[in-house]
Amino acid sequence: MAEGNRRVPQNLQGVLRLAVEAGSASDGPAPHEPLSQERIEFLRGALAEVCKGQMDEVEQMKQCVSVLLREQGCRERESEGEGGEEEEEDEREAALELLSDLCENLDNARDLMKMGGLDVCVSRCLCHSEAGIRWRAAQLIASCSQNMPEVQEYLLQQGALRTLLRLTDHDPHPTVRVKALYAVSCLVREQEAGLQEFLSHDGFSVLMRGMQSDSEKLRTKSAFLLLNLLTSHPKHKDTVLCMGMVQQLVAVLRSPHSSVHEHVLGVLCCLVEESERGVSDCRDPSLGLEEILNQKVQELQGRDESQEELDFCERLRAACFRGQLPDDNGMDR
């Protein structure tokens, strides 16, 4: 195929892939020949297009941040009536959504941090009076902080985690609470400094209350994060046991069946593993856990979609009421 007919890559990964293909075109033992001048010019053009696109994205982020920074710059609109104010909020929401999309690219997330965009997000948007602004700000924080220690540390220094935990715990809008918890997860999983701050702000209690929420999404995500943290950091099991976590988890199992039950059972399995205190709490006759497990096993038998939940039930019965765990470790799933 002639070089002029090649499709220009749309991102840096595409350019790099093309360069690798150019360098590995020959499978034989002969040494690679130098790139032709035509190929060199093509790659230069592709790189130029990619860099131009990245510059465009930086400019887009700057414009979005300027929209978020408009505090009283649109007072003239307010005199036009409620429509102008709603339009202003729509612009802020659109800016946050665009930033979230752009910051799926880790380089953009870092650039947004450096230009002060995350500071604006934490100081202005997370505490905004409009729920649509608050949850989109939490979504943006989650997008930027995933797998980005540099951004995570910056956000922790800005006090983002405390605000996010407060939103998770107390915000009246369920979507805000769910998105805030997602952002909390991105700041504390595989991040020791974030975990320590989470502990200092009584984060486990926030998760406990989240599992008692009216929102099924919040209950499920709270239980899932609790399971992840205890599995990754078993040294904190005693902390949650002393909080009466087993009693709270069993109370959740008494509620109508939902997806949260699987994660709650997983947490209970984690708490009884190599923990006499955990086993003892589960054996408390006043909880009636054995009866709950027996009933669940009967209900879940033969349901392929509930196999993992059934496995957790069997593990708990073996650990607490038969004195041993099955050989298969369901926690490794």
Image (tube, rainbow, N blue to C red):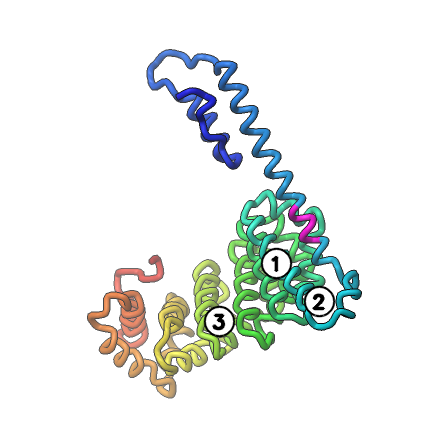
Query: What are the residue bounds of the magenta stretch?
Result: 60-65
Which of the 4 quarters of the picture holds residue 331?
A: bottom left
Spot occupied by residue 228 in the image (x, y as percentages of width and height): 45, 61
Q: Are marks 2 and 3 in contact (CB under 8 Å)?
A: no
Q: Quadrant of the N terminus?
A: top left
Residue sitting at 44 percent across and 22 percent down? 22
Is residue 162 left or right of 263 when viewed as pictured? right
**C-alpha span from label 2 to label 3:** 34 Å
Crowding near the residue tagged with mark 2, few <14, some 14–19, many ≥20 C-alpha atoms within 10 Å: some
Is residue 211 left or right of 93 when viewed as pictured? left
**C-alpha span from label 3 to label 1:** 25 Å
Q: Quadrant of the C terminus?
A: bottom left
Q: Amino acid at mark 2?
A: Gly
Magenta highlight on residue 62: yes
Spot occupied by residue 66 in the image (x, y as percentages of width and height): 72, 53
Magenta highlight on residue 221: no
Q: Nearer the viewer, residue 49 or 268?
A: 49
**C-alpha span from label 1 to label 2:** 15 Å
Q: Which mark is residue 218?
A: 3
